[in-house]
Image (cartoon, rainbow, N blue to C red):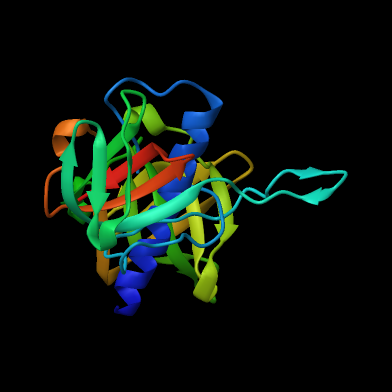
Amino acid sequence: MTLNQSLKTVALSIIIAGLAGCSQAAPAQPTTAAATSAVTPAPATAAAPTAAATSAAAAAPTSAAGPRANPIERINGTIQSFSNGTLTLSGGKSFTVSDKTRIIRIEAAKASDLKSGDYVAVTAKRQPDNTLLASIVNVFPDSMKGVGVGQRPMTGGNLMTNATIDQINGSSFTVTFPGGGAHVTLAPDAQVNKLIDGSQADLKEGATASAAVLKGIAQSISVH
C-alpha cells in the first residue's frame, strides 16, 4: 500500500467513525449512510483497505471497573455479494445491512469543485509558517455538516481538520471551525473526494467498502 493509500484509509476511517457515532447518537435516516470524520482506534480489516477510512478517536467510555473496549468493529474489503440484507466482503467477512444503516458513496472530485460553505475533512501536514499542506480533502454532504468538527492529530504527523471552507483562492483556501481556523494549500497530488448520501443500491459487487459494525449489524458503510 502506498503512503497516499494509507493516508486515504485513515482519513476515510475517521469518516466512518464519525458516521458510526451519528448512527448511535440518533436514528439513521432510512437507506442512507455516511463516510469521515472523527473517532477511534485502528480498524480490524477483512482485507487490505484500499480507501480512506478511520478517524481520530473519541476516547472509549470508562467505568469504575476500568476502560471498556470499543464495541464497534471496523471492516474493510471488496464487496463479494449483497443478498437478503447480508453483505459479504473479500475474505469471507459478512454482516447485516438494515434499513437504518447509513451508506455514503465516495466519488472523485477536483480542486475546482470546492466552494465556499462546503464542510470538509482535510488531511494535512502543518508547515513552518503554520499553514496546512493538504494531501486529502473529503467534502461532506449537507446531512453530515458538523460531524467531528475541529482539529486533531493523526498518525504520521498529519492533522485532521473538519471545518467549513470560508474563502478560496486557486489551490488554496481558508477554513473555520468553532474556536479556530486554518489556511490550507493543496499539495500537487492532493486527492479531493465528494461524499454523497447513498443507498443499498450502491452496495455492488466489486466496490470497495468500509463499514462500522456493531453486534453483526452495519451502523455505517462507505463505498467507492
Residue furthest to the bottom: 2
| Residue nearer the viewer, 167 or 22 | 22
Q: Residue at x 35, y 31 (%)?
A: 101
Residue furthest to the right: 64
> Quick one: quadrant of the N terminus?
bottom left
| Residue nearer the viewer, 203 or 153 | 203
| Residue nearer the viewer, 77 or 223 | 77
In the rendered image, residue 9, in percent from the top left (x then y), is placed at 36, 63
What is the total number of numbered labels drawn onto the structure image?
0
Question: In which image quadrant can residue 217 be found?
Answer: top left
The image shows residue 163, relative to residue 90, as above or below, that is above
| Residue nearer the viewer, 137 or 115 | 137
* Res. 116 visible in picture: yes
Question: In which image quadrant can residue 195 be found?
Answer: top left
In the rendered image, residue 13, in percent from the top left (x then y), is placed at 42, 54
Q: Residue at x 34, y 63 (%)?
A: 8
Q: Residue at x 54, y 41 (%)?
A: 177
In the rendered image, residue 130, in percent from the top left (x then y), is placed at 55, 67
Residue furthest to the left: 205
- In this rendering, would 23 be left or right of 64? left
* Res. 129 visible in picture: no
Question: In which image quadrant can residue 201 be found?
Answer: top left
- In this rendering, would 142 be left or right of 67? left
In the rendered image, residue 71, in percent from the top left (x then y), is placed at 57, 46
